[in-house]
């Protein structure tokens, strides 16, 4: 299991675009600001809006040191070799600053948006990562017997002329770091086995037992990068409302009834009754009630909110966990500066 660390790193979580996309100038100013503050990395995500790679290309072109990471790029959006080519291209253009965070997403997105099957996510992930590493190593032409990503393809519609191919470009790095976004116990164990790092959706520094078994066999240098909402405010309850809003949406509606990984995770973290109550309210169309049903205790555990002195005190709990990077979604210069000072 990874050891606890006093050397907490900071990442800026750009996430994915909502209804109103940022301007290119805004993005440049933000990423240059956090690079100057000493943030170690910049992360992007995707859902069914912006893609995870384009903002990183823009950010990378206007920075020189900060690392660039997808957190996460959805596997069903790209074949494994396409993902490998995206990662290689960005890693080369950024002089080796890239990390690839990937995840399976959920059945509503995979089958509803990408039109791909969701079944057997663990087996698909294992195949996917193996193909990524084959591409970058260039030891031999890439092959995979399937069943999820057969190479060469010889299924329905094939003309029988496919042949194994080797990447034309010689990568400067044969091992681009791979992170898995994972929530379920089996997925987290898989991350410790085949990946260089893990991106949890929620992590409570006061409940290490939730993931202790899954992380037991992780190597000492295993990276854990977790999203943490950070807000400087005198009124803690008021500052938690946006956190509860996000949690209400993910736990209540970001998945089908009975197949929502976010709901199940909250239940495993000790809030089972509240988790399924939030989901029921959301599906009944009572979204405001669903948000208010998110316990302050849960929202507070996975965040850093309150006066500066409170954040300074509460960040110490994170230093006693195996988490290596806090991914901060704030755009507030005072918040970013405070966290940089606390982790410098």
Image: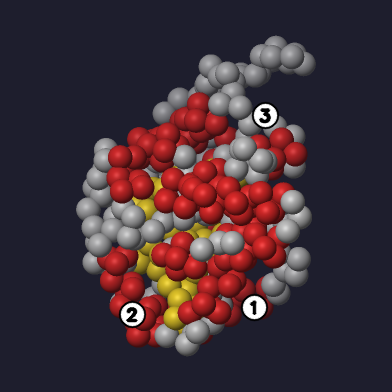
The local crowd at label 3, few if under 14, some if 14 to 19, many if 20 or more residues have their Cα within 10 Å, is few
Q: Is residue 20 visible?
A: yes
Q: Which residue is mark 2?
A: 312
Measure the alpha-carbon separation of dots 3 and 2: 45 Å
Residue 149 appears in which quarter of the rendering? Answer: top right
Where disc 3 sits, the SS reads: loop
Give the percent coordinates (x, y) of residue 55: 62, 62
Q: Determine the residue positioned at 62% across, 74% down.
A: 27
How is the rendered protein coloured?
Answer: secondary structure
User: Quick one: 14 or 120, which is closer to the camera?
Assistant: 120
The numbered mark, 2 or 1, whose residue comes first in the sequence reads: 1
Q: Nearer the viewer's eye, disc 3 or disc 2? A: 2
Give the percent coordinates (x, y) of residue 131: 50, 31
Q: Which residue is mark 3?
A: 117
The local crowd at label 1, few if under 14, some if 14 to 19, many if 20 or more residues have their Cα within 10 Å, is few
The quadrant of the picture occupied by the N terminus is: top left
Which residue occupies the extreme top position in the image?
A: 160
Q: Which residue is mark 1?
A: 26
Horizontal arrangement in the rendering, residue 153 relative to residue 89 (left or right): right
Give the percent coordinates (x, y) of residue 134: 46, 31
User: Quick one: 273 or 5, which is closer to the camera?
Assistant: 273
């Amino acid at each position: 299991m990874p050891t606890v660390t006093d050397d907490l790193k900071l990442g800026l979580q750009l996430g994915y675009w909502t209804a109103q996309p940022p301007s290119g100038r805004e993005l440049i100013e933000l990423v240059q600001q956090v690079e100057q503050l000493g943030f170690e990395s910049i992360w992007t995500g995707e859902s069914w809006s912006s893609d995870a790679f384009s903002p990183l290309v823009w950010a990378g072109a206007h920075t020189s040191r900060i690392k660039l990471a997808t957190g996460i790029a959805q596997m069903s959006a790209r074949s494994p070799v396409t993902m490998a080519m995206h990662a290689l291209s960005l890693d080369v253009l950024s002089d080796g600053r890239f990390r690839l965070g990937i995840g399976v997403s959920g059945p509503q997105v995979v089958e509803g948006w990408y039109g791909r099957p969701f079944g057997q996510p663990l087996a698909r992930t294992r195949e996917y990562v193996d193909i990524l590493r084959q591409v970058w190593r260039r030891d031999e032409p890439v092959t995979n017997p399937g069943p999820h990503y057969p190479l060469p393809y010889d299924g329905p519609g094939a003309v029988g002329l496919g042949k194994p191919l080797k990447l034309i470009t010689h990568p400067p790095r044969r091992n681009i770091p791979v992170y898995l976004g994972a929530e379920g116990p089996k997925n987290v164990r898989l991350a410790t086995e085949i990946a260089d790092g893990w991106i949890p959706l929620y992590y409570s520094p006061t409940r290490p037992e939730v993931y202790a078994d899954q992380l037991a066999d992780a190597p000492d240098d295993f990276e854990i990068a977790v999203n943490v909402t950070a807000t400087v405010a005198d009124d803690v309850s008021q500052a938690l409302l946006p956190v509860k809003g996000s949690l209400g949406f993910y736990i209540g509606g970001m998945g089908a009834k009975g197949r929502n990984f976010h709901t199940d995770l909250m239940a495993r973290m000790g809030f089972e009754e509240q988790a399924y109550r939030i989901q029921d309210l959301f599906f009944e169309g009572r979204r405001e009630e669903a948000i208010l049903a998110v316990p302050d205790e849960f929202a507070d555990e996975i965040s850093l909110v309150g006066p500066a002195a409170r954040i300074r005190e509460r960040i110490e709990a994170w230093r006693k966990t195996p988490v290596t990077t806090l991914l901060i979604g704030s755009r507030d210069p005072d918040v970013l500066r405070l966290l940089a000072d606390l982790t410098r």
